[in-house]
């Protein structure tokens, strides 16, 4: 007989969130901005986004020119009350969707990172609020990520290409 799992304590939920955000910051530095004039910063001021990529064109004046806003969503199924362990759903509030350029989804137990343009999130209703969702799946047949999920796994070049436009 399987014992029903209790809800995870809030401090552990926050720790999982921090792990995803810090991992995303490290990968953004090492795979996207290293060697460029872009920096990776944790966002403390702007609503609806966790990480800012900022470009400094004039180092003497430290005038920030160019900005890419990234929201990070971390999902895990190791300690959860849910039953479906082959999917991870990344959900954005309307504020997060409006204020982010990219979403980095981290699936903890598989150590998968997904770089997802916000346009890929589908509008859905959650109670009375508008939310946006993107789901990644592992195939029941192959045990591997589905083609739709693979499309954005570790696609750091999507953000690198956006840096070139700014």
Image: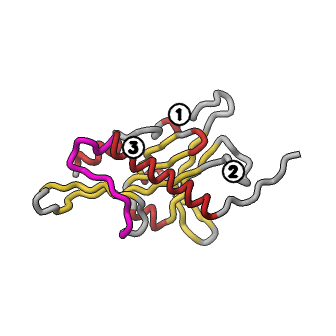
Q: Which residue is mark 1?
A: 147
| CA distance for labels 3 and 2 | 25 Å
Q: Which residue is mark 3?
A: 27
Between 66 and 120, the one nearer to me in the picture:
66
Kind of element beneath mark 1 = helix
Q: Nearer the viewer, mark 1 or mark 3?
A: 3
* Dot 2 and dot 1 residues touching (CB under 8 Å): no
**Where does residue 69 sit, x and y in percent of width and height?**
35, 58
Counting every numbered tag in the picture gives: 3
Taking 110 as reference, is 69 above or below it? below
Between 139 and 23, the one nearer to me in the picture:
23
Residues drawn in magenta: 31-45
Kind of element beneath mark 2 = loop
Q: Which residue is mark 2?
A: 79
Taking 156 as reference, is 57 above or below it? below
Mark 1 nearby-residue class (10 Å; few <14, some 14–19, many ≥20): few
- Mark 2 vs mark 1: which is more N-terminal? 2
**Where does residue 34 sit, x and y in percent of width and height?**
28, 42
**Where does residue 75 sit, x and y in percent of width and height?**
58, 50
Q: Residue at x 39, y 46 (%)?
A: 26
Q: Quadrant of residue 36?
A: top left
Taking 82 as reference, is 30 above or below it? above
Furthest residue in direction right, as rendered? 1
- Mark 1 vs mark 3: which is more N-terminal? 3
Kind of element beneath mark 3 = helix
Residue 72, numbered circle? none
Q: Residue at x 50, y 49 (%)?
A: 105
């Amino acid at each position: 007989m399987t014992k029903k799992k209790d809800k995870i304590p809030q401090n552990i939920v926050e720790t999982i969130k921090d792990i995803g955000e810090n991992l995303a910051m490290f990968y953004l530095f090492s795979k996207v901005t290293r060697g460029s004039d872009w920096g990776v910063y944790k966002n403390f001021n702007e609503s609806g986004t966790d990480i800012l990529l900022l470009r400094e064109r004039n180092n003497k004046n430290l005038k920030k020119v160019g900005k890419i806003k990234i929201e990070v969503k971390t999902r895990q199924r190791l300690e959860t009350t849910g039953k479906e362990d082959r999917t991870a759903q990344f959900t954005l509030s309307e504020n997060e969707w409006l204020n982010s350029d990219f979403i980095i989804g981290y699936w903890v137990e598989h150590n998968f990172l997904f770089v997802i343009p916000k346009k890929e999130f589908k509008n859905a209703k959650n109670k009375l609020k508008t939310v946006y969702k993107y789901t990644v799946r592992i195939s029941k047949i192959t045990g591997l990520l589905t083609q739709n999920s693979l499309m954005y796994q570790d696609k750091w070049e999507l953000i690198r290409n956006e840096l070139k436009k700014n």
